[in-house]
Image: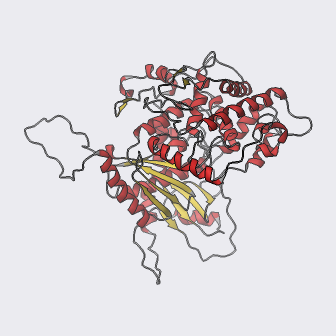
Amino acid sequence: MVNCIRLNSVLRAGGRALSTTAGKKQRPLVAETADQHHVTRNNFSDVQRVRHEQAKHSVLIGCPAKINENKFLKYLSQYGEVASHFFFDSNGTHAVVEFVDLQSINSFLAGTKIPSDEDVFVVPYKSRYIRLKTTEVGQQFPKCWPQFCIPMNSLVEKLCGAESIEDQAHLLLDDLQLTEESIRLRYLVSSLISDIATAYFPEASVHLYGSSVNSFGKMGCDLDLFLNLEDIKGYRSGKMTSPYSTEFWMRRVSSGRTAQQKILSVIGECIDSFGPGCNEVQKILNARCPLVRFIHQSSGLQCDLTADNKIALRSSELLYIYGNLDHRVRALVFALRSWARVHGITSSIPGHWITNFSLTIMVLFFLQKRTPPVIPTLDQLKNLAGKKEKSIIDGNDCTFVRDLNKIRQTANKEPLDGLLIEFLEFYGKFDFKTSCIDIRKGVEKNKPEAAALYIQNPFEQKLNISKNVNQSSLQRFVNLAQESAYILQDQGGRPSKKGKPWGLASILLPASADKGTSPKRKKKVSASERIGSLLESLKDNDDTGKAQPGH
């Protein structure tokens, strides 16, 4: 087990140090066990625990656009030692400040006053989101860390200067993956929402799941949150050891789903009424997995809060394990997600498109099919699990080994550029008509039911995570895979002598940007057809719900 105190100082941050006090630098938050591609052997639960502790020690401060950083830190130091801080710009300049101990947080909050606005009444809900005012003038703009991806055209231009497709893939990964600052901000937002939820349920906890924690998160991705009520002591009664017992007098409801809806409705109302910086709150309670959706304006994050999504949390950990077993996994997934998004194979809005989660599972399945396999199957991970790692959720077997150090490294040494081409060829000729994709077994199986694309849910095995995909969307994916494989093979993996986009950059160009590589012209879709497709997909998404992490 990784020592969590040590882990706190070695979590990765891409080789950079976060600023602490003026003139000093904190040790870079780089895992001691990580390689040059940020693959770590730190266990998911240990990382989660430390990140949550960092967030509890942190405050979010809205700052003036111009501020003297040294004087700002000197002001904060009167309340206690500052462990780290950084600035970012999202609807104004903000700072995330981590104090060494919780007493400093309490002291800082005790010295913060309630605003006095004469025209309106202030709702006196105190949180760790603070506004800083200053009378000083002549300040400087602080260095703000970006919270969103660089534009694709700038990224393509950058990739053209790389020496190999593998270098291109890792450059793309470095530019698109969540930064240390973004990760810390996400955990802080989660902690602020937890403060609201625990006002009603003090022993409950709020966890992150999906892209923010599964190692495949892209800058600007949504923040998925899960309110875990089963952390409440006494939620599961044990055996009676005495003739007498006591229990809390509580409301009874007809089902667990009804309880979730009521709880989320109340918490959603609190977020809307009292949550500083939380806007556009929607209570989507009739979805398969009820949720509250809102925008956390100061961070720029769209947040989804659910109350019963334990399987999605396990899926996030499973993807985290796969992403950290081999550096090629994340690089390949990020490259193919970017490729799919540029060409409209995936989309940020619901529809008949392949989702990021489905595409990631397709990549994992492909890597399991290599000789020798790059990654193990889910059943193989299950066989490595100990008794304490056994997990059954709602009748579904969610067991797998959680200690990365117990998983043997692969003997497969295929280069990343070869794997990219092989993936495109593999699915360019895959028998989608009769076969389904299953990462639990790592082999093709006959489809259990009719569907254009059938990808078996790793845990809820009766569900098809790609149920929303229609035949035309699948065929577009197949055609694009064949076309892109041809482009890369034709180039032979060599940089263009004429300065043209090559390698990964050449297949990240939209069809209109390079007419020579697009022999087929896209059929124009009318507005009525797009609306009809969207309405139909929303109906499908209501069946599959929010059980898919990593969008």
Quarter of the image where the N terminus is located: top left
Of the 4 image quadrants, the one containing the C terminus is top right
Q: Position of residue 545 (x, y in %)?
A: 45, 43
> How many numbered callouts?
0
Question: Closest to the observer: 32 or 273?
Answer: 273
Horizontal side, residue 118 vs residue 364: left or right: left
Identified at 78% across, 28% down, the residue is: 486
Relative depth, front residue between 169 and 529: 529
Q: Is residue 203 visible?
A: no
Q: Is residue 84 visible?
A: yes
**In terms of image quadrants, where is residue 265?**
bottom left
Q: Is residue 286 left or right of residue 143?
A: left
Q: Where is 87 relative to 135, above or below?
A: above
Residue at horizontal 42 percent and vertical 78 percent from the top: 121
Please provide percent x and percent y for residue 395.
Answer: 34, 30
What is the residue that sits farthest to the right in this orientation? Answer: 498
Residue 400 on image: x %, y %: 44, 26
Q: Position of residue 500 (x, y in %)?
A: 87, 40
User: Of residues 168 and 61, which is closer to you in this image?
Assistant: 168
Against 78, is 491 above or below?
above
In the image, residue 489 above or below residue 19 = above
